[in-house]
Every structure is written in C-alpha cells, then in structure tokens.
Image (cartoon, helix red, strand yellow):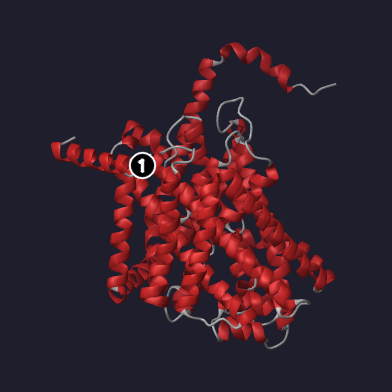
Amino acid sequence: MTEETRESSGTLDRWARALGLRTNPTIFFVSAGLMVLFLALLLAFPDQTGRVFTAGREWVVTNLGWFFILGVSVWLIFLVGLAVSRFGRMRLGSDDDKPEYRNLSWFAMLFAGGIGTILMFWGVAEPISHFTEPPRADVVPYSPEAAEDAMGFSIFHFGLHTWTIFTLPGLAFAFFVYRYKLPMRVSSVFYPILRDRIYGPIGKTIDIFAILGTLFGVAVSVGLGTQQINAGLAELIGAPDSVLVKVIIIAVLTAVAVTSIVAGLDNGIKRLSNINIGAAVGLMVFVLVTGSTVFLLRQIIESVGIYATSIIPLSFWNDAMAQYTDPEGWGWQASWTVFYWAWTVTWAPFMGIFLARISKGRTIRQFVVGVLVAPTLFTVVWFSIFGWSAMDIDGIGGSGGDLSQLVVGEENIPGAMFEFFANFPAATLVQGLAVVIVAIFFATSSDSASLVVDMLCTGDAGSGPVRQRVFWGVAEGMLAASLIVVAGEAGLTALQEVITVVGLPIFILVFVMAFALFRGVQESAKAERVTEPARAPARPALRRRPK
C-alpha cells in the first residue's frame, strides 16, 4: 500500500467516525460518490448518455442475446443438479443451525422483496400485450392460439428462469458467508478464486459495482411503480399524470421504506411482507371468485401444462430466424426475454444477499427447492387468474377490446391493472386496494435493498447504525425522484438502457459465481470427509427406517 493510499484510507476512516458510521469507509464513500457523479452526468447530459447506452444495449442484445438465453438455462440446470446431488444435504451454516424463519414468513419475504412488484405491474399487461401482438409470426392476434402463447411466454418470463437469476447468487452468498464465515459481501463468493484478495482492491471493486447496480436497479423499479400508482390514483380520484404527483408518491414510498428500515428486518420488512402477501392473495382470490371461476380453475391446471411443454423450447429459443423475418434483424426476443434477463441480473446481488440473510440454517436442497419452486407455483396461479381473466374480458377469438387498446394502442401499461378491475364488482374499492398493495410492494423492495446495501458496506449480516440504513433508503428515493423531476420519462428510459448494458458484466460475474460455488462445495465436502472419519460407522444407523 502506497503512502497516498494509506493517507486516503485514514481520511475516510476519520469521516466515518465523525459521522457515526459502522462500515467499510472505502466501499461506503466511493459507492456514494460514484452514485452522485453518475446521476449528475445522466441528468446533465440525458440525450448524449441516452444515445450511448441505447447503442450499447442494441449491440448487447444483437450480438450477445444468445449468451443471456443460454446462460440462465445453464444456471437452472446447474442448480437442479446441485440440489439432487449428495451436496444437497449440506447446511447453509453449521451442521446444527436451524432456519431462523418459518416457511410462510420466509416465502413472504423472498416473494415481496423480489417479484411481487413485477407481478402487480405485468400480471395483466404482459399477457394482453402478447395476446394482441403475438411473438410468433404465424399466430393470429386474439386467437385461442395467441392466448395460449401469451400465457406460455408470460409464465416463462417470471417463472423458474427469473428465480434462477436470484437463487444462484443467493445460494453462493449463503454458503460462503455461513459455511466459510466470510463477510456478508458479494466479493466473499469469489473466495475459492481470489482467496484473501477479496479483502483488497479487487474485492472492494466488486462490492462497489454490486452496490451501484442495486441502487440504480431499485431506482428504475421505484420509478415504474410510481407510474403505476399514479395511474391508479388517476382512475380513482382523477389525479393528474404530472411530475409533482409522482414526486409526492416517491416521497410517501420512501417514508414508508425508511420507517420499515428503522424498525429492522423482523419488525419492519417481515411484517410488511406478511401483510402484503396476504392482501395480494386476497386480491387474487377475489378475481377468481367474482370472475369466470370455472374457466379460471380449468385454466390454472391447463397453464401448468402450457408452461411444462413450453419451458424447454423457450429456454433455448433465440429467434435466430429474425434476420430473415424482422426488419431490425434482432427479433422480438431482444426487446423482451433478453431485456428481462439483463435487467433482472442487476438485481442479483441485492436479491442474493437478501435471500442469504433470511435463509441461514437451511440445506442447499431446501434453499433451491424453496426459492425456485414456491414462487414459480404462485406465479403460475397468478398469471392464470389475472392473465386469462384479462384475455377473456378482452375477447378470445374476437378483435380485441379496451385492455388491448390501452396496453398496445395507447401504450399505457401502468394503467392496465386498474382498467382490468373496472370490470369487477366494487371496482373503486378494489382499485384502491390495488394501489395500496403496489405501494407496499415497492416500499418493501426499497427497504430490502437499503438493508442489503448496508450489509454490503459493513460486511455484517446484522443491522448497522440507523442513520446508515436511512441514508441508503433516502438515496434510492432521491435517485428515482431526481430522474423524474429533471429528465422525466427520458431519464427513466435512459436508465433502463444503462441497466441493460450494466447487466452484461454482472451476468458474467454470476457465471464465475457458479464456478466458485461448485469449487467451494467440493472443498467443504472434502474437508468434512477428512475431519469426521470417526463418525462414519454411525451413519448407516441414521439411514435406517424407524420400525
């Protein structure tokens, strides 16, 4: 370490002590500084940055779209193989550790922190979009075939593959943090490769990059959630679609998130998650009971079959013939599947750390099955009820209706859910409940992200000082609000382009995580065989069935 580096590190340490922080000063201050610098550049030069990252996104999806599609499918196969292997019995922690949370609370937290916001946003809009404009050229819009294709693509986008992107980093973090007793940081996953260098500049760079990806990924989601809440308030009380209303919404969401942050994981995030998942399930049951109940019950079962028969073809479908059928040359999938995977992977550090934090004591098999299967089953039921109801209302076999016109014709995706509820009893009450559910889902994502960013800075699974956690919660709200105030829709669009480009290096990192995890699991199993020879005779007795 040079004299200048030591002096700089000492200065950051003094700043941290003066502010009452308990964190790694380099990671904290560099991350915060780069966040401010990046935001300033984005807002000062929105057109220029937009063009640069638009070109970057087009290059990524055109030349490396196949890499994203193949990659997530390979990760899924790897996870399933690891879970069913002899390594699946390994516990994420010491051999006598037990899960900290009951299954229901565990599922509620991982669901609300991960995909709950997306299901509310896309539950109606995506099936209607594919129903109106089918991905495959030989499918007739609004036909029964278009409806089945729409359901297959929608569940594929939010089923096993999306949760694979969260599960792999989450499993890697939990394994190395609880099994190897390493800090709660992204860099810890690379210990089998970097060893003690995870504590040096390379490790800190990885952690800083993960923090920035989390902050901007959540900022985009909060911005999208704000649009949906604004659309709901417009439907309920005629609120204008304006910058001021969106800023007020973000301020309220941030206040709720900060309150939850101060309360902590058990009293804040856990409680909000349990309340919200209950409300979301209630909303889903309401649609099932007051809608075409028998039709929907039949479609829930049929949608399982649609997903089962389409998952393998879609897992490897690259739309390779688009160069002959699409004027742009890179096809429908670049705008949907590739974009989803690139954007979702920017959440991988956040969701991975969060899943690791709430999963100590579970086995590898329990973790993989729980995180992959439970949310996917819920997703199938959710899309079956909301998606099929929406397409039924719009007219399967007809020529489209109000929902198609809103989503595709007017491109008002945020308003799709509220237009959908206008077709049900007590529409105003249900729309109001939907606004509250959306708001809590986004607030929960924000407070979960703040907790994770704080962990990345401290390297500790426990809670840091309140002021430290509040800082990151407020920073996320300010990022989203600043984009809306200064750059409006152009800012959010530009940030989505940025995230797609940023997703590429994170995607590569997750590939390396898979290699590091497999290597770490092998090392741990080998160490157990060496240190536990005396216990070997007792194992056959443990495997006997009780009489």
Identify the image quadrant of the N terminus.
top left
What residue did someone put label 1 on?
20
Q: Is residue 420 visible?
A: yes
Residue 538 lies in quadrant: top right
What residue is rendered at 70% in x and 70% in y? 386
Direction bottom: furthest residue:
399
Secondary structure beneath label 1: loop
What's the residue type where badge 1 is placed? Gly
Residue 423 place in picture, x, y as percent: 74, 80
| Residue farthest along the left direction in this orientation | 3
Residue found at x 62% / y 25%: 96
**At 67% from the left edge and 46% from the top edge, which residue is drawn?**
105
Q: Quadrant of residue 405?
A: bottom right
Place of residue 502 in the rendered image (x, y in percent of width and height, measured from the top left): 37, 59
Q: Is 69 in front, or is 407?
A: 407
Q: Position of residue 339 (x, y in %)?
A: 47, 66
Asked if one can make out residue 165 in the rendered structure from this viewpoint, the answer is no
| Quarter of the rendering occupied by the C terminus | top right
Which of the pair 4/258 is nearer the observer? 258
In the visual, does 451 lie left or right of 272? left
Q: Is residue 425 left or right of residue 325?
A: right
Q: Position of residue 510 (x, y in %)?
A: 44, 48
Is 30 rendered above or below residue 279?
above
The mark tally for this picture is 1
Q: Count residues near mark 1 (Cα–Cα under 10 Å), then give few for <14, some for 14-19, many for 20+.
A: few
Q: Residue drawn at (28%, 61%), measured in percent from left and top?
A: 37
